[in-house]
Amino acid sequence: MFIAGLQAVLGADGVVTALDETRAFTQDWRGRYSGQAVCIALPRKTEQVAAVVRLCAQAGVPVLAQGGNTSLCGGAVPGTDGPAPVIVNLQRMRRIRSVDPASNAIRVDAGCVLAAVQRAAVDNDRLFPVSLGAEGSCQIGGAIATNAGGSGVLRYGNMRENVLGLEVVLPDGSIWDGLRALRKNNTGYDLKHLFIGSEGTLGIVTGAVLKLHPLPKAHATAWLGLDSAEAALAVLELVQAACSGRLSAFELMSASQVALVARHVPGRRCPLDGAPRWHVLMELSDTCSADELGDAMQAVLEQAIGCGLIGDAAVAASEAQRNAMWGYRHGASEANRVAGIGLTTDCAVPVSAVPAFIAAATDAVRAIVPDLPVMIVSHLGDGNVHFIPFLSFEHWGGLADREGFAARVRRSVNEVAVGLGGTFSAEHGIGQTLVAEMARYKPAAEIAMMRAVKRALDPSGLFNPGRLLP
Amino acid sequence: MFIAGLQAVLGADGVVTALDETRAFTQDWRGRYSGQAVCIALPRKTEQVAAVVRLCAQAGVPVLAQGGNTSLCGGAVPGTDGPAPVIVNLQRMRRIRSVDPASNAIRVDAGCVLAAVQRAAVDNDRLFPVSLGAEGSCQIGGAIATNAGGSGVLRYGNMRENVLGLEVVLPDGSIWDGLRALRKNNTGYDLKHLFIGSEGTLGIVTGAVLKLHPLPKAHATAWLGLDSAEAALAVLELVQAACSGRLSAFELMSASQVALVARHVPGRRCPLDGAPRWHVLMELSDTCSADELGDAMQAVLEQAIGCGLIGDAAVAASEAQRNAMWGYRHGASEANRVAGIGLTTDCAVPVSAVPAFIAAATDAVRAIVPDLPVMIVSHLGDGNVHFIPFLSFEHWGGLADREGFAARVRRSVNEVAVGLGGTFSAEHGIGQTLVAEMARYKPAAEIAMMRAVKRALDPSGLFNPGRLLP
């Protein structure tokens, strides 16, 4: 009856119920989380999403909005307790609705894959700057619902800063058309910001107007060797003062992390011959000529070397060398996967507090396991540190209570971050896994406001129950 | 009894009741709006604000938060109907709490005057980029509550984009400490965006962490003469492609507006000798050398002249000439005040729609009054057009129903903007004057959500009643 109603809205092929076909939707891509769903709904347009939501509201069935299912914290698949939801997956809504280059705006369906939006921008001589590992499969709607971060945040901000307008199906099944392409609009509460980062708990994003930027034509990329995280911070400050908005990446890595990439990723060779304690991948990008940008890079490196902040530096002399540097940086995930068990964390602190955070977090985890190796990959420019206590497979295999151990180690890192005015989830979000941390760290007044907003927009509590809110 | 309670919290000098002293708070700076207040509360710290709000909540007395009282739409003073409020003015809370240059963050009391924050930034070799006419008297809390715009929006965004964290006293008298200095934080709804632009209807902002930026050291400024608004748009696109983030101002003015400044503002002389139909003031700013920036300006102007987009151009050869260009641009307000009655509007449309907006709005107002003069000042880079139907004092004086006429003319302009996907209030906000326009133009789903949020956070409806929400 309920399924028949959905089929009447979506057509027979728009409702997936066969268990072997639903698994791709009910289990996350790493196979760590899975749960039951009533069915998978595959709408082709906004009105169908609204009709599905109305049917669910009438029947009291929970609604779980799903994009590319690339969450790192179980945010896009059902849990194991509570009533099973209808999963509304937007993969069939993937039109680029329109591009307005003169307004630097693009209007898209929420089911568009992020990489398709990036390509549409380039086709119009523009940049869509949100860029992350999952960009080949994650969808715009999911990137909005989780306020995706990535490597472009230093210069262009998070997903939030790149959304101009939204179209949302609300929990009562009504459609909010907030698809504006305006840079200034002071007419009441800016409701789009409620939905950005709300992880499907307030509505389903079905469309968006996104910001475009001038397409950089030149890049200047350098790999730096430094003695300390403090020196890296000083170089960052110096480069920002000299190069301002041209600085597009400033990625810090510990020597331990760099060594792991060299050892475990075939074909990767560190751009520096020496053995500095810290490494920085730094990039300038602009619409100017490559020569002009190269001169700017040269000048600022000479300044930093003159101040004694940099021990050694290599500048990419070709696009191939630039790609090799980025490949080395991105090799960290692969190296960590094959070399052992990394207990990844996702903290951010005020930029000036990053060195203190790294020092104190290292002490904290070594108070649990003396001499525990630690890998560090940090988007230093925005204060986001992936601090990764690292165990050999043998060590991990020999632990009596692995989950408890992992939780204890991660908690010790999060405590340090929060103590420095930081956050326990900088870019990955809350999903299923961090709800308890929310209860622990969020001020009571803030939790109370979130709950009040949730009740106001989703009084029946049917949208993604059990997620985000403690 | 109620007043005594406030005095117990604030001290005798913290509660103003004498009519001759309250007038500065109950009447707006232009003398257009005024109303009654129970009293003026002048707290010195956040806890006092919270205590005042609790007393008001117990007594059922409305609360009106006030900053520098510089609203252009009666947003900061009481209305004439409904029970009189307590005005909570934050002028005594004006500490710069701390500056963290390495994190590009400054922490301030909400009562800080905007210009004081700008100065504190410069003292730390940083820029706080929000800049507007009232910066010498408007307060940060008011600029946040109204999401202030101004001339820096093209490059740095509105006030909203320059707030990292907030401290807010909520309608129940509790204090939300959201004073974070983080660039990434994905832990639930981003509640600060609810308060930014909420015009005092959801709480009182008492403190903020604001974003700082590298301080530009060089400016290159040019005055351009063009044939059409379309040509101005083409130049904007060309400059953005060539100069990217260096473009810091792109201000369009009609020949009528330029002529009025020349005629009515003593000492002002148009930077161009000819009589182009449109004028653009364009500025590049960066941390690089003045020579480098001058070369970039020269190159892009040659390109635009080569494309036939610019008829004539003057480049400022000194800081004095730069100031003269800006003085000419800013002379528009004074010229319009002395020359007649300007029915200022504050629309924004997608940038690409600005020429169509100007053409259609001109037609619309001339359908009411044939040949009506129109002054146009536009922040073209962010689509914001101050389209100003202009009447001589004689014309205005001879009108039978001035208010009705002004409303009719403004409405005709707003209709055009909204029809082009635009807004009737780009940067000035809603206040008392535009509540009816909210009811007319906002989608029903959006009004319903706003009301739901208002009820959720201010169930008694005591915060700035009658404002913003229809």
Image: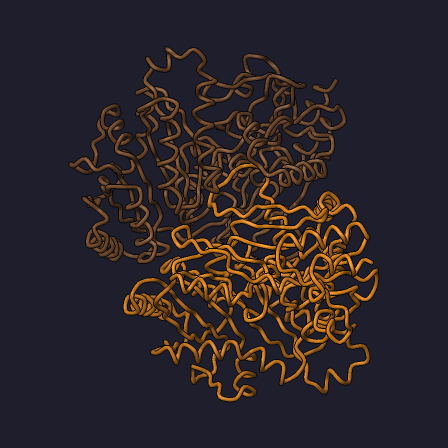
Chain colours: A brown, B orange
When the figure is inspected, residue B177 is found, relative to residue B405, above or below; the finding is above
Q: Position of residue A423 (x, y in %)?
A: 49, 38
Instruction: Work out whether A206 lies above or below A342.
Output: below
Point 30% across, 50% down: residue: A234
State which quadrant residue B247 falls in: bottom left
Residue A155 in sight here? yes
Say left or right for A106 vs B370.
left
Q: Nearer the viewer, residue B346 or A337?
A: A337
Describe residue B42's horizontal placement relative to residue B184 as left or right.
right
Residue at x 52%, y 76% (from the top left corner): B330
* Side of B70 where A353 appears, left or right: left
- Foreground: A215 or A163? A163
User: Is B448 or B175 nearer to us in this picture?
Assistant: B175
In percent of width and height, residue A9 lies at: 69, 27
Position of residue B53 measured from the top left corner of the image (x, y, whole percent) = 72, 53
Picture quarter with the C terminus of chain A: top right
- Identify which residue is drawn at 27% across, 41% down: A228
How far from the left and from the top, in percent, is residue A150? 42, 39
